Image (cartoon, rainbow, N blue to C red):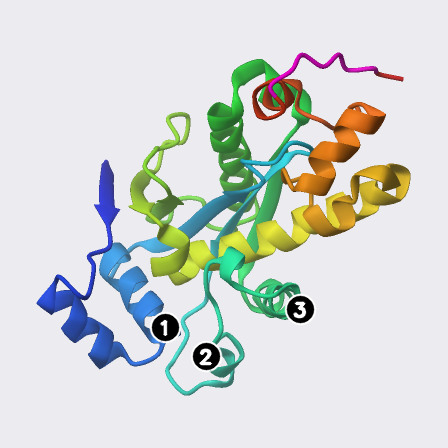
Amino acid sequence: MTEKREAGNSKKNPRAQTEYLECGTRLKRMLKFDVRMRGKEAILIGTDEVGRGCLAGPVVAAAVILPPIRTGSKLSQALEDLNDSKQLSSQNRERLAEIIHQNARCAIAEATVKEIETINILKASLLAMSRAVTKLLEEQEDSVRNYLLAIDGNKRIAELQLEQVTVIDGDSHSASIAAASVIAKVYRDSIMTNLAEQFPNYLWESNKGYASQAHREAIKEHGPTPWHRKTFLDRVLNEQLTLQFD
């Protein structure tokens, strides 16, 4: 069963505004959002992807099962800044990722540039999330538990035989999805930083493969690498580029 939800605007929705005030901190609101989704019986898995809009590199996804987090606990204090990974500094993301890995059940997977080019970026993003969720479930000792999968966005993962809920802007509303976005982002950033040592002209250590002005100019000057997505380059640079593979 799939349910598509979009968080209400607290300025227009009195009920949402009341919930905002009652929950207090962002983390409390996000945890309460997760509790409402999963109910009393289900184990919630949050999944999200990063790198969908990049010109280069894989798309990476993560799946996370957070432990129970009590208000005022050391873990809740450590995760106080948890949010959509795009809203966090790199230092904060890395700190949070370490805490999440230490306390939650996590799995990370990716879809390659070749897969992105072959099946398109949307399907590749869903494929990466499917792989991450499957990997996480394979690591669980009890495979017959009642799981609920919370997916960032509005597309369900058809090949997964799990109850699913799609959440628009889920990484801003769900603690589980936000946690997945953080560890996926940190993992992918490390990939691009390492690749930058092999391809220093493209400044991937700073732009992480996104279409910054410096990155676009570097492609025009030096040509694309095997890590560039040709279909993206054709559209973003508005010119036909031929990939030269080693």
Q: Is residue 235 above or below residue 181?
A: above
Residue at which label 1 appears: 26
Q: Residue at x 35, y 37 (%)?
A: 162
Q: Quadrant of residue 197?
A: top right
Give the distance between the C-alpha atoms of the residues marked 2 and 3, in whole angstroms: 18 Å
Q: Nearer the viewer, residue 157 or 187?
A: 187
Q: Quadrant of residue 222?
A: top right
For the N terminus, the image quarter is top left
Location of residue 177 in the rendering, given as x and y in whole percent from the top left corner: 43, 54
Location of residue 154 in the rendering, given as x and y in whole percent from the top left corner: 32, 37
Residue at which label 3 appears: 91
Q: Nearer the viewer, residue 243 or 218?
A: 218
Secondary element type, mark 1: helix
Magenta-drawn segment? 238-244
Residue at which label 2 appears: 76
Location of residue 212 in the rendering, given as x and y in whole percent from the top left corner: 65, 42
